């Protein structure tokens, strides 16, 4: 029995799917194409509670500290893999000029589970609860982990999805006369 060659439309539909997949990967790995440049300190101003019930307002850091927002969830393996680096950053940088706020975006994450993860991974920074997902939506977070670095003046100076192998070397680029660490 003689087989007919595959129909060219089969290859075209596979190619179209592949190109769509590549385009989506590019968009999600480059959040500036998702409107990140439209994020401003005014839009980002928020008030959330820590897991201990303390109110934290982003505006309170303006003029005082560089703020590193980490959007994460307890069920995210990539988020948990970054926790040793977060711990390293937290202990290496001066807490008088650099603040890490870990915002849990897991709407169904229980306080008990968050505390368990905090203890297991020895997360030293403040953990904030975005229980309704309002801040996550305002910040246009598509996937976690997501990092947003905000300068002392309130401007967004970087946004990325994964910390590099040596985060301290990477973060040195934020040290300027306007943003000393």
Image (tube, rainbow, N blue to C red):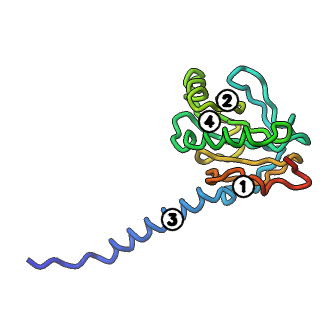
- Judge whether 15 appears above or below 137 on screen: below
Looking at the image, tell me whether mark 4 or mark 1 is earlier in sequence order: 4
- The image position of residue 35, as x and y in percent, is 70, 55
Residue 105 circle label: 4
Badge 2 marks a residue whose secondary structure is strand
Q: Mark 1 vs mark 3: give the one in front.
A: 1
User: In the image, 94: left or right of 73?
Assistant: right
Q: Residues within 10 Å of mark 4 (few under 14, many from 20)?
A: many
Label 3: which residue? Answer: 22
Badge 1 marks a residue whose secondary structure is helix
Looking at the image, tell me whether mark 4 or mark 3 is earlier in sequence order: 3
Separation of residues labelled 1 and 2 (CA atoms):
29 Å
Looking at the image, tell me whether mark 1 or mark 2 is earlier in sequence order: 2
Q: Measuring 71% from the left and 26% from the top, which residue is drawn there?
A: 50
Looking at the image, tell me whether mark 2 or mark 3 is earlier in sequence order: 3
Looking at the image, tell me whether mark 1 or mark 3 is earlier in sequence order: 3
**Displayed quadrant of residue 137:** top right
- The image position of residue 74, as x and y in percent, is 55, 33
Separation of residues labelled 4 and 1 (CA atoms):
28 Å
Q: Residues within 10 Å of mark 2 (few under 14, many from 20)?
A: many
User: In the image, 14: left or right of 124?
Assistant: left
- Judge whether 69 appears above or below 28 on screen: above
Q: Tell me, yes or no, whether the two marked residues, 1 and 3, touch with CB atoms within 8 Å.
A: no
- The image position of residue 118, as x and y in percent, is 61, 28
Separation of residues labelled 2 and 3 (CA atoms):
33 Å
Label 1: which residue? Answer: 169
Q: Nearer the viewer, residue 35 or 71?
A: 71
Q: Tell me, yes or no, whether the two marked residues, 4 and 1, touch with CB atoms within 8 Å.
A: no
Q: Residues within 10 Å of mark 1 (few under 14, many from 20)?
A: few
Residue 129 circle label: 2
């Amino acid at each position: 029995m003689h087989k007919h060659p595959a129909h060219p439309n089969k290859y075209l539909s596979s190619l179209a799917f592949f190109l769509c997949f590549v385009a989506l990967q590019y968009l999600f790995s480059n959040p500036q194409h998702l409107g990140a440049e439209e994020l401003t300190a005014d839009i980002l101003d928020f008030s959330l509670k820590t897991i201990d019930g303390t109110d934290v307002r982003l505006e309170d850091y303006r003029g005082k500290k560089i703020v590193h927002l980490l959007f994460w969830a307890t069920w995210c393996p990539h988020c948990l893999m970054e926790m040793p680096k977060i711990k390293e950053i937290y202990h290496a940088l001066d807490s008088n000029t650099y603040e890490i706020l870990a915002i849990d975006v897991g709407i169904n994450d229980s306080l008990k589970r968050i505390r368990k993860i905090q203890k297991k991974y020895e997360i030293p920074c403040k953990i904030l609860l975005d229980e309704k997902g309002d801040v996550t939506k305002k910040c246009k977070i598509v996937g976690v982990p997501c990092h947003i670095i905000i300068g002392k003046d309130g401007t967004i100076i970087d946004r990325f999805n994964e910390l590099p192998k040596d985060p301290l070397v990477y973060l040195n680029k934020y040290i300027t006369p306007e943003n000393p660490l």
